[in-house]
Image (spheres, grey):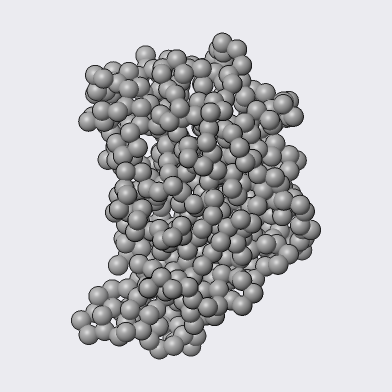
Amino acid sequence: MIQLLTPTQSLAPQTTGNLSIALLNSAKLHRTKQAIVFEGTATTYGELEERTQAIAWQLSSLGIKKNDKVGLLFPNNPEFVSSFFAVISLGAVVVPINPLLRSEEIRHILQDSGAKLLIVQSNSLPEAITALPGITSLEHLLVSSSAVVATIDQATLDRLPSHIRAISLTAENHCLGPFAPNEDIDPDKDLALIVYTSGTTGKPKGAMLTHRNVTAVLPGPLLGHCDIGHSDRWLAMLPLCHVYGLGVIVYATIATGGTIAVLEKFDPVTALETIEREKVTLLPAVPSMFQFMVMELERKKYDVSSIRVCFSGAAALTPEVMERTERAFGAPVVEGYALSETACGATINRINARRIGSIGTPLEGIEICIFDESGVPLAPGPENVGEIAVRGNNVMLGYHNQPEATTEVTRDGWFLTGDLGFADEEGYYFIVGRKKEMIIRGGQNIYPREIEDVIMRMEGVREAAVVGVPDTYMGERVKAIVVLATGAALSEEQIKDYCNAHLAPYKVPRLVEIRCDLLPRNSTGKVLKRLLS
């Protein structure tokens, strides 16, 4: 049975100063309490603060100061958390880099951001070194493993450009005394992060997020109505290098004095075992993660009774997946909507006022509007589909080094998301698809999300994605790529017939491709549709 929570007064967000003050405040209140649990080892708030200060001292000794860019190339682990707060405490700017990226992609991010130093875990060192030639801004490579510079393959180190020094990240917590965060911070102008978008089209762009952008919605407006507090235990299986993981898990959890159970990477069995062992109470994930965990729960019993709220974001959650997730975990799913450019918060489907299928209503202090192609606001109603725009203190300053790209997505203070949707009369918002994913067939606009939702209702379907393919006569045809569950047997004609029974004829896929392999996704769980057409 799902237990709905009574909303409480929202947590007061940090509105001034350096983001790293959140760690100092929690360390004062909860010094001996577990901050992080990773591979059976617990780190207390006192230990996390000491480790953070030791890294901050080392970075400072290497000349890192306010506004310098520092890349973090890590999988999920405690060192990522301490390095994040260490960089922020100096007033420097964190540039998180996905450890799954290849050298060409790493090079683009380092070049574009102008990173002065890169902190990298040793197992990512070969890929990182391959990326470094030609990056003139980078001065230091800090490797997060003691003595790794002495033990790493010499041939790898020989490829390091001569102007870059490789240094081991100090293993011991050697401090010259307490490290005071740089409080010479203008929260509205000084950057905390440059988060690179997933790059589903073209090269990734760096969204410049200020200290104010992060604190505008975290932890108060986004999490306050769920009664989040220091007794909560979060599962960190989302990539911490993305804004969802950085904001909701790293910053908001530390700011509220909670505990983070960290998984290096997502695996449904490991996730469920961790929930059972660590008595996890809060479960942030993307829809695909929920699907895989639910499938495992249907195969084998785990004790997940400690879970009280599931959070879903980064991709569309169908009503069917929501229902299965709530039934499996016995807890409500809270769906939110945000982008890297809006610092992890824009709308939320509040627990006690949910509208299934909706992304909810705007967070406190955030405005949402639906614009037509001419920039005219549209009235509520499902017939008035337009581009969703966001305005508020959560919206980025712009794209780093890309003023033209910034201009393309901004209008009178509004950030144009590229997502298509509509509002109802009560102020709830609904997404129907991406602007660039919209299919135009014979002059008719078709939104892939609607067709995907129908196909996902079919028994035996595991995943589905809908794209437009060129057609000589109609402009585009609808194509559905369908992944079947293990043991399921569905034909192309059965899928078409089902769609024909639930959709207008012009929306029914003319092409159906049935696959055995899962759909290609980026690390935030979004399907890479450019690889499917």
Looking at the rendering, which quadrant does residue 15 occupy? top right
Residue drawn at point x = 51 percent, y = 21 percent:
55
Residue drawn at point x = 64 percent, y = 67 percent:
323
Residue 86, x across and y down, in percent:
52, 26
Residue 53, x across and y down, in percent:
57, 21
Q: Is residue 266 visible?
A: no
Residue drawn at point x = 72 percent, y = 26 percent:
28
For the image shown, how many numbered marks are present on the structure? Answer: 0
Residue 171, x across and y down, in percent:
51, 17
Residue 133, x across and y down, in percent:
23, 29
**Quadrant of the snapshot with the N terminus:** bottom right
Query: 272 or 68: nearer the eye?
Result: 68
Looking at the rendering, which quadrant does residue 329 occupy? bottom right
Query: 251 or 391: nearer the eye?
Result: 391
Residue drawn at point x = 32 percent, y = 43 percent:
401
Q: Is residue 6 visible?
A: yes
**Quadrant of the snapshot with the C terminus:** bottom left
**178 sits left or right of 257 in the view:** left
Residue lying farthest to the front in this orientation: 412
**376 sits left or right of 161 in the view:** right
Query: 480 or 292: nearer the eye?
Result: 480
The image shows residue 341, relative to residue 35, as above or below, that is below
The image shows residue 209, relative to residue 61, as above or below, that is below
